[in-house]
Image (cartoon, rainbow, N blue to C red):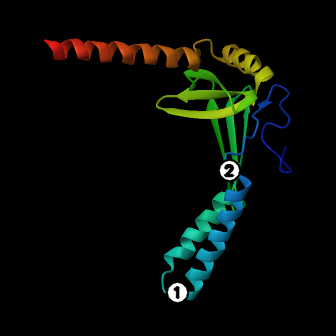
Amino acid sequence: MSDIKLPWDDDSEAIKYVYVNPRKKFSEKYAYVITSILIILGITTRYKLTLILALLLLLSLLSKKYVAVSAKGLEMYSDMKITHTYNVWNWSDIEAITYEKKAEEPKLTLLYFTKGDVTKRFFFDEKDKERVFDLAHKHNKKIKIYDAWEYKQDLKRFKKEMKNMNKKNRKK
C-alpha cells in the first residue's frame, strides 16, 4: 500500500484500513489548477496571503493517511511530505466501535472509533470487521460495539414520538 515504512508493518495482527478517495479525479485536478493560480497570484500581487493558502492547499493534496488496528490500538500515520505524525489510540482509551454499511461501498464496512468526545471513521474490508472486534475485545473487554443502522432506527422512532407529543401539546 505504501512505499514508506509504517510502524505496524512488522505486526502480524495489524489490520489495515482500505483507502477510499472521497475526491473525484476532476476535483483533484481542479485543486492543482487553483493551487497554481494562487501561487502565481501570490508572487505577482501584493496579496501574499494567497501564497500561504496555495502552500496549505498543496500540502493537503500531497498528504497521505495510513491507518491500522493493531495490538496497540488504533494507529494513525500521516505523511505530509515535509513532516509526519504518528498517533495511537490505545485500546484502554477507546470506548466504542460503531459499524455501518454504506451503499456506495458494498464490500467495505465503515467503522467509527470513539474516544471521549472524538470519533474517527475508517473503511475496512467486510471480512476484517469481526477481526477488529475480536482484537478490540481481546485488549479491552469494556469496548462497546454498536450497529449504526439500529441507532438510526431508534433515532427516527424517537423523533416521531417527540413530533407526536408536540402535536398533542399544541392541541391542549
Find disc 1 in the rendering and name its residue: 45
The residue to which callout 2 is attached is 23
Task: Look at the image and tell me whether residue 47 can be seen.
Answer: yes
Q: Is residue 94 above or below residue 145?
A: below
Instruction: Find residue 156 and report its horizontal and vertical position in percent.
Output: 44, 18
Residue sitting at x 69%, y 17%: 133
Q: Is residue 141 above or below residue 5?
A: above
Along the line of sight, the residue nearer the viewer: 165 or 127: 165
Of residues 101 and 55, which is closer to you in this image? 101
| First in sequence: mark 1 vs mark 2 | 2
Q: Residue 39's spot in the image, x, y percent?
A: 62, 77
Quick one: quadrant of the N terminus? Answer: top right
- Which quadrant would residue 18 be assigned to in this image? top right
User: Of all residues shown, which one is farthest toward the front?
Assistant: 171
Q: CA distance from mark 1 to mark 2?
A: 30 Å
Marking on residue 24: none
Q: Position of residue 83 (x, y in %)?
A: 68, 58
> Which type of secondary structure does the marked residue at label 2 adopt?
loop
- Residue at 86% from the left image edge and 51% from the top image edge: 3
User: In the displayed structure, does residue 122 sit left or right of residue 52?
Assistant: right
Q: Residue 45 in the image: state x and y as whole percent.
A: 52, 86
Element assignment for label 1 = loop
